[in-house]
Amino acid sequence: MFNSTQVMETIDMVEKEHLDIRTITMGISLLPCMSGSAEATAQKVYDTVCSKAENIVQVAKDLSAEYGIPIVNKRVSVTPAAIICAPFPEKSARIGKALDNAAKTLGIDFLGGYSALVQKGMADYERTFIRTIPEVLASTERLCSSVNVGSSKTGINMDAVALMGDIVKETATLTADRDGLGCAKLVVFCNAVEDNPFMAGAFHGVGESGTVINVGVSGPGVVQHALEAIPGANLSEAAETIKRTAFKITRAGQLIAREAAKRLQAEFGIVDLSLAPTPVRGDSVAHILEALGLETVGTHGTTAALAMLNDAVKKGGVMASSKVGGLSGAFIPVSEDIGMIEAAQKGAINVDKLEAMTAVCSVGLDMIAIPGDTPATTIAAMIADEAAIGMINNKTTAVRVIPVPGKNEGDEVSFGGLLGRAPIMPVHGASSEAFIRRGGLIPAPIHSNKN
């Protein structure tokens, strides 16, 4: 039970500090939908998603009204579509469009799972499927795509990395009229997780139950406010404050997750602890780091401060819920965090610093706008660098970069809504092509041999 003090704390967190449930995501297995033809499979996919998630939007509205906590996004994730499309990979776009139509029918924000898992190798059908991604993302509105190219157990599939450099470029070109917006719906992973509720990387793993509810909570503003209340505290005390705050945030998330699962006749999966920012002032991970004493995010000490924040959030969250999963860390998307946007505009943060920061947080180089003429091999090399950090450190890393057609360093692009805006950030001009063209597999690290 909550006492009156805890109730008032929660009200303050919602009204003054931007506490919200960032997403309720229903994971749905599509394995029973596999049929002999693309047409029959697409119809079954549409029917299954619409049936299973029929009430997700209404349940979210009801819970938000009853508990007084905003639920920002209602989403669905599905079995990696490359598996479902294996018998007819050249017709994969039919499945993608069926999924997008289902999302529109349901009125949800995004649907994730137009995905492929190729961390050790690519079958012919997977390669064909991946090549459909640009066309599908350009012709749909709410569908998101992801590809896992590496893991700590298998190494990094550099053939897949090279291919994804081309796919990102082609996606940007096909959505050039929207400043390459298709790339905002495409993420390349190492160590992708099966229960991630956040887009664009959500998919429903084959090891999951048939229908699952995963919830992502978010409260950067709550953490920032708590730290600003103790300006003279040392870092041990600051970490303890973050931990206690994360505990409160997670308890709210677990309450919503359990009730949502019950009402939607699904299993309660996990609560994802990730601090997910928005472009709204007062809802920034960058500003948390600055509240710890940095003049601006990106200066020396940023990586250390982020490591402490990420660890404290995890410690507080796992005390509050027995079902913590997903990514569970601190997101640092440039275009979606007002503090990151401002730091990038004044040159305080660059891609190299962001790469260093990803070694200690979730998830990777995220929502970074780069020059439209950046070579595909350079993008592939960025993916390889992030995958190496994930592989060696046994953590999830990812790349979601947007080579904006016709834009150069110093320009700015606006995507609108939660996707925000971003200055075009420079990348290194020296070529990585010969390295990427070698292909093959970067072997898994020695510590992967744990059997």
Image (spheres, grey):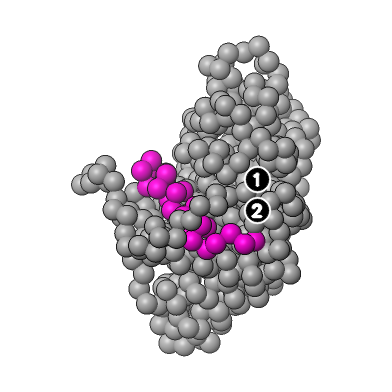
Type of amino acid at the residue the image marks with label 2? Ala
- Residue pictured at 61% horizontal, 33% vertical: 298
Is residue 190 left or right of 320 when viewed as pictured? left
* Along the viewing direction, whichever of 146 and 442 lies nearer the viewer: 442
Tell me the chief SS of the magenta region: helix
Please identify the quarter of the rendering in which residue 112 is found. Answer: bottom right
Q: Residue furthest left?
A: 451
Is label 2 in a helix, a strand or a loop? strand
- Residue pictured at 68% horizontal, 38% vertical: 347
Location of mark 1 (residue): 334
Location of mark 2 (residue): 369
Q: Can residue 300 be seen here?
A: yes
- Residue pictured at 48% horizontal, 56% vertical: 431
Is label 1 in a helix, a strand or a loop? loop
* Along the viewing direction, whichever of 133 and 373 lies nearer the viewer: 373
Type of amino acid at the residue the image marks with label 1? Val
- Marks 2, 1: nearer the viewer: 2
Q: Residues within 10 Å of mark 2 (few under 14, many from 20)?
A: many
> Residue 363: x and y, percent?
52, 46
- Is 32 located above or below residue 145 in the figure? below
> Could you tell which of marks 2 and 1 lies nearer the N-terminus?
1
Which residues fall within the magenta stretch? Answer: 372-395
Please identify the quarter of the rendering in which residue 208 is found. Answer: bottom left
Magenta stretch contains residue 396: no
The residues bearing labels 2 and 1 have C-alpha atoms spaced at a distance of: 8 Å
- Is 214 located above or below residue 239 in the figure? below
> Residue 95: x and y, percent?
54, 78
Does the residue at mark 2 contact the one at mark 1 (Cβ under 8 Å)? yes
Magenta stretch contains residue 384: yes
Q: Can residue 24 be seen here?
A: no
